Protein backbone atom coordinates (compact mmCIF):
# COMPACT_ATOMS: atom_id res chain seq x y z
CA UNK A 1 0.00 0.00 0.00
CA UNK A 2 2.87 2.33 0.88
CA UNK A 3 4.60 1.57 -2.41
CA UNK A 4 1.40 2.34 -4.31
CA UNK A 5 1.02 5.69 -2.54
CA UNK A 6 4.64 6.51 -3.34
CA UNK A 7 4.14 5.64 -7.02
CA UNK A 8 0.99 7.76 -7.20
CA UNK A 9 2.85 10.61 -5.54
CA UNK A 10 5.69 10.36 -8.03
CA UNK A 11 3.25 10.25 -10.97
CA UNK A 12 1.43 13.33 -9.68
CA UNK A 13 4.73 15.14 -9.25
CA UNK A 14 5.70 14.26 -12.82
CA UNK A 15 2.42 15.64 -14.17
CA UNK A 16 2.89 18.85 -12.21
CA UNK A 17 6.48 19.15 -13.46
CA UNK A 18 5.42 18.71 -17.10
CA UNK A 19 2.60 21.18 -16.61
CA UNK A 20 4.93 23.76 -15.10
CA UNK A 21 7.40 23.22 -17.95
CA UNK A 22 4.67 23.84 -20.51
CA UNK A 23 3.58 27.02 -18.71
CA UNK A 24 7.17 28.22 -18.55
CA UNK A 25 7.62 27.46 -22.22
CA UNK A 26 4.45 29.32 -23.14
CA UNK A 27 5.52 32.34 -21.12
CA UNK A 28 9.03 32.35 -22.56
CA UNK A 29 8.08 32.02 -26.23
CA UNK A 30 9.22 33.76 -28.31
CA UNK A 31 12.53 34.84 -26.83
CA UNK A 32 14.18 35.72 -30.15
CA UNK A 33 13.21 36.72 -33.71
CA UNK A 34 11.12 34.31 -35.78
CA UNK A 35 11.77 33.43 -39.43
CA UNK A 36 8.93 33.26 -41.94
CA UNK A 37 9.91 31.37 -45.09
CA UNK A 38 8.20 32.78 -48.19
CA UNK A 39 8.81 30.38 -51.10
CA UNK A 40 8.78 33.13 -53.75
CA UNK A 41 10.89 36.16 -54.58
CA UNK A 42 10.80 39.48 -52.78
CA UNK A 43 8.26 41.96 -54.08
CA UNK A 44 5.79 39.40 -55.42
CA UNK A 45 2.18 39.15 -54.21
CA UNK A 46 2.80 36.33 -51.70
CA UNK A 47 5.87 38.07 -50.32
CA UNK A 48 4.03 41.40 -50.01
CA UNK A 49 1.13 39.88 -48.08
CA UNK A 50 3.52 37.89 -45.90
CA UNK A 51 5.41 41.04 -44.92
CA UNK A 52 2.21 42.89 -44.02
CA UNK A 53 1.02 40.02 -41.81
CA UNK A 54 4.45 39.44 -40.25
CA UNK A 55 4.72 43.08 -39.24
CA UNK A 56 1.19 42.97 -37.82
CA UNK A 57 2.05 39.92 -35.67
CA UNK A 58 5.02 41.64 -34.07
CA UNK A 59 2.94 43.54 -31.50
CA UNK A 60 1.44 40.37 -30.03
CA UNK A 61 4.66 38.34 -30.06
CA UNK A 62 7.04 41.01 -28.86
CA UNK A 63 9.59 39.81 -31.40
CA UNK A 64 10.08 40.58 -35.10
CA UNK A 65 9.26 38.06 -37.81
CA UNK A 66 12.03 38.11 -40.41
CA UNK A 67 11.12 37.20 -43.99
CA UNK A 68 13.39 34.70 -45.75
CA UNK A 69 12.69 34.40 -49.47
CA UNK A 70 13.60 30.87 -50.59
CA UNK A 71 12.84 30.64 -54.30
CA UNK A 72 12.91 27.90 -56.90
CA UNK A 73 10.85 25.03 -58.35
CA UNK A 74 7.51 26.84 -58.05
CA UNK A 75 7.84 27.19 -54.29
CA UNK A 76 8.75 23.59 -53.48
CA UNK A 77 12.30 24.44 -52.35
CA UNK A 78 11.09 26.95 -49.77
CA UNK A 79 8.36 24.67 -48.47
CA UNK A 80 10.88 21.83 -48.27
CA UNK A 81 13.23 23.93 -46.17
CA UNK A 82 10.40 24.78 -43.79
CA UNK A 83 9.45 21.10 -43.52
CA UNK A 84 13.01 20.23 -42.44
CA UNK A 85 13.21 23.02 -39.86
CA UNK A 86 13.01 22.40 -36.12
CA UNK A 87 9.50 22.38 -34.66
CA UNK A 88 10.32 24.99 -32.06
CA UNK A 89 8.11 27.82 -33.29
CA UNK A 90 10.94 29.86 -34.76
CA UNK A 91 10.30 28.87 -38.39
CA UNK A 92 7.01 29.61 -40.14
CA UNK A 93 5.94 28.46 -43.59
CA UNK A 94 3.91 31.05 -45.49
CA UNK A 95 2.09 29.90 -48.60
CA UNK A 96 -1.24 28.75 -49.86
CA UNK A 97 -3.13 26.84 -52.51
CA UNK A 98 -0.24 26.67 -54.97
CA UNK A 99 2.49 25.73 -52.48
CA UNK A 100 0.56 23.61 -49.98
CA UNK A 101 -1.96 21.93 -52.33
CA UNK A 102 -1.25 22.03 -56.08
CA UNK A 103 2.51 21.47 -56.05
CA UNK A 104 2.26 18.09 -54.33
CA UNK A 105 0.14 16.78 -57.20
CA UNK A 106 2.43 18.21 -59.89
CA UNK A 107 5.96 17.77 -58.52
CA UNK A 108 7.75 14.95 -56.76
CA UNK A 109 8.40 16.63 -53.41
CA UNK A 110 10.41 15.41 -50.39
CA UNK A 111 7.71 16.32 -47.90
CA UNK A 112 4.05 15.68 -47.12
CA UNK A 113 2.04 18.90 -46.95
CA UNK A 114 -0.36 17.39 -44.42
CA UNK A 115 1.88 15.19 -42.28
CA UNK A 116 5.00 17.37 -42.14
CA UNK A 117 3.28 20.59 -41.10
CA UNK A 118 1.01 21.85 -38.35
CA UNK A 119 -1.58 24.46 -39.42
CA UNK A 120 -1.62 27.85 -37.72
CA UNK A 121 -4.12 30.08 -39.49
CA UNK A 122 -5.78 30.95 -42.77
CA UNK A 123 -4.94 34.52 -43.73
CA UNK A 124 -6.66 35.88 -46.83
CA UNK A 125 -7.75 35.02 -50.35
CA UNK A 126 -7.96 36.66 -53.73
CA UNK A 127 -10.61 35.62 -56.23
CA UNK A 128 -9.85 35.18 -59.90
CA UNK A 129 -11.69 36.96 -62.69
CA UNK A 130 -12.59 35.58 -66.12
CA UNK A 131 -11.59 38.32 -68.55
CA UNK A 132 -11.31 38.76 -72.30
CA UNK A 133 -9.97 41.22 -74.84
CA UNK A 134 -12.22 44.23 -75.40
CA UNK A 135 -12.76 43.44 -79.10
CA UNK A 136 -14.01 39.91 -78.41
CA UNK A 137 -17.48 39.02 -79.69
CA UNK A 138 -18.84 37.81 -76.35
CA UNK A 139 -20.15 40.27 -73.78
CA UNK A 140 -21.38 37.80 -71.15
CA UNK A 141 -20.01 34.55 -69.76
CA UNK A 142 -22.79 32.54 -71.41
CA UNK A 143 -21.95 34.11 -74.76
CA UNK A 144 -18.26 33.40 -74.19
CA UNK A 145 -18.88 29.72 -73.40
CA UNK A 146 -21.15 29.37 -76.45
CA UNK A 147 -18.46 30.93 -78.65
CA UNK A 148 -15.80 28.62 -77.24
CA UNK A 149 -17.99 25.55 -77.78
CA UNK A 150 -18.60 26.58 -81.41
CA UNK A 151 -14.90 27.28 -82.04
CA UNK A 152 -12.85 24.53 -80.33
CA UNK A 153 -9.12 25.17 -80.21
CA UNK A 154 -9.36 28.58 -81.90
CA UNK A 155 -9.35 30.81 -78.81
CA UNK A 156 -6.12 31.58 -76.96
CA UNK A 157 -5.98 31.66 -73.17
CA UNK A 158 -2.97 33.01 -71.26
CA UNK A 159 -1.62 31.12 -68.24
CA UNK A 160 1.45 31.53 -66.06
CA UNK A 161 3.04 28.24 -67.00
CA UNK A 162 2.52 24.56 -66.36
CA UNK A 163 1.13 23.74 -62.94
CA UNK A 164 0.38 27.28 -61.84
CA UNK A 165 -3.00 28.29 -60.50
CA UNK A 166 -3.99 29.98 -63.75
CA UNK A 167 -3.08 26.86 -65.71
CA UNK A 168 -5.04 24.59 -63.38
CA UNK A 169 -7.97 27.05 -63.53
CA UNK A 170 -7.96 26.85 -67.33
CA UNK A 171 -8.07 23.05 -67.21
CA UNK A 172 -10.95 23.20 -64.72
CA UNK A 173 -12.80 25.73 -66.90
CA UNK A 174 -12.53 23.56 -70.00
CA UNK A 175 -13.70 20.50 -68.11
CA UNK A 176 -16.71 22.29 -66.64
CA UNK A 177 -17.77 23.97 -69.90
CA UNK A 178 -16.97 21.21 -72.39
CA UNK A 179 -14.69 23.53 -74.35
CA UNK A 180 -11.22 23.30 -75.84
CA UNK A 181 -8.97 26.37 -75.61
CA UNK A 182 -5.42 26.96 -76.84
CA UNK A 183 -3.23 27.67 -73.76
CA UNK A 184 -0.42 30.20 -74.06
CA UNK A 185 2.01 29.89 -71.11
CA UNK A 186 3.88 32.94 -69.82
CA UNK A 187 6.93 32.29 -67.69
CA UNK A 188 7.22 35.93 -66.64
CA UNK A 189 4.06 35.90 -64.51
CA UNK A 190 0.66 37.48 -65.05
CA UNK A 191 1.85 41.01 -65.87
CA UNK A 192 3.11 40.33 -69.45
CA UNK A 193 0.06 38.15 -70.11
CA UNK A 194 -2.28 40.97 -69.12
CA UNK A 195 -0.34 43.36 -71.34
CA UNK A 196 -0.89 41.06 -74.32
CA UNK A 197 -4.57 40.74 -73.43
CA UNK A 198 -4.91 44.52 -73.38
CA UNK A 199 -3.13 44.65 -76.75
CA UNK A 200 -5.55 42.08 -78.16
CA UNK A 201 -2.86 39.49 -78.84
CA UNK A 202 -4.50 37.03 -76.40
CA UNK A 203 -8.23 36.28 -76.32
CA UNK A 204 -8.88 35.57 -72.63
CA UNK A 205 -7.49 34.85 -69.18
CA UNK A 206 -8.59 33.58 -65.80
CA UNK A 207 -6.53 36.09 -63.88
CA UNK A 208 -5.91 37.42 -60.39
CA UNK A 209 -8.33 40.22 -59.65
CA UNK A 210 -5.62 42.62 -58.48
CA UNK A 211 -3.83 42.55 -61.84
CA UNK A 212 -6.89 42.60 -64.12
CA UNK A 213 -9.28 45.02 -62.39
CA UNK A 214 -7.33 48.20 -63.21
CA UNK A 215 -7.66 47.35 -66.91
CA UNK A 216 -11.31 46.42 -66.53
CA UNK A 217 -12.02 49.80 -64.96
CA UNK A 218 -10.38 51.63 -67.87
CA UNK A 219 -12.30 49.58 -70.41
CA UNK A 220 -9.20 47.97 -71.90
CA UNK A 221 -10.47 44.44 -71.25
CA UNK A 222 -13.84 42.82 -70.50
CA UNK A 223 -14.75 41.08 -67.25
CA UNK A 224 -17.22 38.19 -67.53
CA UNK A 225 -17.37 36.88 -63.95
CA UNK A 226 -15.57 36.57 -60.64
CA UNK A 227 -14.79 33.00 -59.54
CA UNK A 228 -16.40 33.28 -56.10
CA UNK A 229 -19.73 33.02 -54.31
CA UNK A 230 -19.84 36.75 -53.62
CA UNK A 231 -19.15 39.80 -55.76
CA UNK A 232 -15.97 41.72 -55.15
CA UNK A 233 -16.34 44.76 -52.90
CA UNK A 234 -13.85 46.55 -55.14
CA UNK A 235 -15.76 45.65 -58.33
CA UNK A 236 -19.43 45.13 -57.44
CA UNK A 237 -20.57 45.38 -61.07
CA UNK A 238 -18.89 42.10 -62.06
CA UNK A 239 -21.27 39.14 -61.58
CA UNK A 240 -20.27 35.95 -59.80
CA UNK A 241 -19.93 32.73 -61.75
CA UNK A 242 -23.21 31.58 -60.18
CA UNK A 243 -24.99 34.65 -61.52
CA UNK A 244 -23.24 34.52 -64.89
CA UNK A 245 -24.17 30.93 -65.73
CA UNK A 246 -21.31 28.75 -64.47
CA UNK A 247 -22.42 27.83 -60.94
CA UNK A 248 -19.87 26.41 -58.54
CA UNK A 249 -16.82 27.43 -60.55
CA UNK A 250 -14.98 28.69 -57.47
CA UNK A 251 -11.25 29.36 -57.61
CA UNK A 252 -9.19 31.57 -55.35
CA UNK A 253 -5.58 32.23 -54.50
CA UNK A 254 -5.52 31.79 -50.73
CA UNK A 255 -2.77 32.11 -48.15
CA UNK A 256 -2.04 30.67 -44.71
CA UNK A 257 0.65 29.99 -42.11
CA UNK A 258 2.05 26.60 -41.07
CA UNK A 259 4.83 25.41 -38.76
CA UNK A 260 6.93 22.22 -38.93
CA UNK A 261 5.54 19.00 -37.48
CA UNK A 262 6.11 18.61 -33.76
CA UNK A 263 5.73 22.28 -32.87
CA UNK A 264 4.24 22.46 -29.34
CA UNK A 265 0.54 23.24 -29.11
CA UNK A 266 1.06 26.27 -26.86
CA UNK A 267 3.34 27.78 -29.52
CA UNK A 268 0.76 27.23 -32.24
CA UNK A 269 -1.89 28.80 -30.02
CA UNK A 270 0.28 31.86 -29.47
CA UNK A 271 1.07 32.21 -33.18
CA UNK A 272 -2.59 31.82 -34.07
CA UNK A 273 -3.56 34.56 -31.61
CA UNK A 274 -0.89 36.84 -33.07
CA UNK A 275 -2.15 36.22 -36.61
CA UNK A 276 -5.75 36.83 -35.56
CA UNK A 277 -4.84 40.06 -33.80
CA UNK A 278 -2.91 41.23 -36.86
CA UNK A 279 -5.80 40.50 -39.20
CA UNK A 280 -8.17 42.43 -36.93
CA UNK A 281 -5.92 45.49 -36.96
CA UNK A 282 -7.47 48.28 -39.11
CA UNK A 283 -4.13 49.20 -40.69
CA UNK A 284 -3.37 45.61 -41.70
CA UNK A 285 -6.91 45.15 -43.02
CA UNK A 286 -6.64 48.27 -45.14
CA UNK A 287 -3.26 47.30 -46.54
CA UNK A 288 -4.47 43.82 -47.47
CA UNK A 289 -7.64 45.23 -49.06
CA UNK A 290 -5.46 47.52 -51.18
CA UNK A 291 -3.68 44.37 -52.40
CA UNK A 292 -6.99 42.79 -53.46
CA UNK A 293 -7.02 40.40 -50.50
CA UNK A 294 -10.16 39.33 -48.63
CA UNK A 295 -9.42 38.35 -45.01
CA UNK A 296 -10.95 35.09 -43.83
CA UNK A 297 -13.61 35.53 -41.12
CA UNK A 298 -12.62 34.81 -37.52
CA UNK A 299 -14.32 31.40 -37.44
CA UNK A 300 -12.06 30.22 -40.30
CA UNK A 301 -8.80 31.38 -38.72
CA UNK A 302 -8.32 28.45 -36.32
CA UNK A 303 -5.67 25.77 -36.92
CA UNK A 304 -8.37 23.13 -37.37
CA UNK A 305 -10.22 25.31 -39.90
CA UNK A 306 -7.03 25.62 -41.97
CA UNK A 307 -6.50 21.86 -41.79
CA UNK A 308 -10.05 21.16 -43.00
CA UNK A 309 -9.81 23.82 -45.72
CA UNK A 310 -6.51 22.43 -47.00
CA UNK A 311 -7.85 18.87 -47.01
CA UNK A 312 -10.93 19.98 -48.97
CA UNK A 313 -8.74 21.77 -51.52
CA UNK A 314 -6.60 18.65 -51.95
CA UNK A 315 -9.71 16.52 -52.43
CA UNK A 316 -10.97 18.95 -55.08
CA UNK A 317 -7.82 19.73 -57.06
CA UNK A 318 -5.61 16.65 -57.00
CA UNK A 319 -8.01 14.51 -59.08
CA UNK A 320 -8.41 17.33 -61.63
CA UNK A 321 -4.64 17.74 -61.96
CA UNK A 322 -4.00 14.01 -62.25
CA UNK A 323 -6.84 13.48 -64.74
CA UNK A 324 -5.45 16.26 -66.93
CA UNK A 325 -1.95 14.83 -66.73
CA UNK A 326 -0.44 18.12 -65.55
CA UNK A 327 3.24 17.62 -64.79
CA UNK A 328 6.12 19.92 -63.96
CA UNK A 329 8.14 21.04 -66.97
Image (cartoon, grey):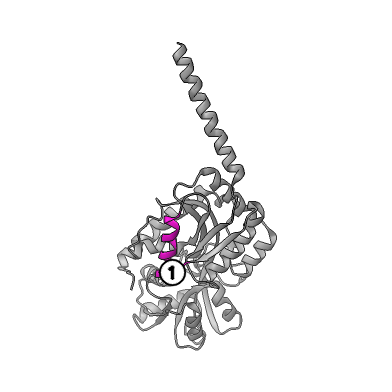
* Disc 1: CA contacts within 10 A as few (<14), some (14-19) or many (>=20): many
150 horizontally vs 203: left or right:
left
Classify residue 204 by image quadrant.
bottom left
The image quadrant where one finds the N terminus is top left
Location of residue 271 with respect to 230 vertically, above or below = above
- Residue at the extreme top: 1
Residue under the image location 42 percent in, 53 percent down = 311
Location of residue 155 with respect to 20 vertically, above or below = below
Residue 142 pos. (x, y %): 46, 74
Residue 185 pos. (x, y %): 40, 79
Relative to the observer, which residue lies in front, 76 or 150? 76
Q: Residue 279: in sight, yes or no? A: no
Marks counted in the figure total 1
Instruction: Look at the numbered disc 1 and give the secondary structure of its residue.
Output: helix
Relative to the observer, which residue lies in front, 189 or 234? 189
Residue 52 pos. (x, y %): 61, 64
The image quadrant where one finds the C terminus is bottom left
Location of residue 185 with respect to 7 vertically, above or below = below
* Residue at mark 1: 165
Q: Residue 9: in sight, yes or no? A: yes
Classify residue 33 by image quadrant.
bottom right
Does the magenta stretch mainly form a helix, a strand or a loop?
A: helix
Classify residue 106 by image quadrant.
bottom left
Residue 202 pos. (x, y %): 44, 85
- Residue at the extreme right: 282
282 horizontally vs 311: left or right:
right
Relative to the observer, which residue lies in front, 285 or 127? 285
Question: In the image, which residues are magenta?
Answer: 70-85
Relative to the observer, which residue lies in front, 176 or 2? 2
Residue 34 magenta: no
15 horizontally vs 151: left or right:
right
Amino acid sequence: MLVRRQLLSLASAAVVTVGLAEIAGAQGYPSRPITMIVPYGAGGPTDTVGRVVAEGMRASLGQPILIENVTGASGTIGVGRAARASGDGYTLSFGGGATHVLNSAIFTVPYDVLMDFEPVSLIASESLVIVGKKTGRANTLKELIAWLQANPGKVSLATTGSGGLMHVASVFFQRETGTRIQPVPYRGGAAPAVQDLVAGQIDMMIDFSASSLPHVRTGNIKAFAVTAKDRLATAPDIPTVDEAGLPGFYISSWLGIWVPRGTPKHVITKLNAAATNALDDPIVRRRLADLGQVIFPLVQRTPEALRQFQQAEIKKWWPIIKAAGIKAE
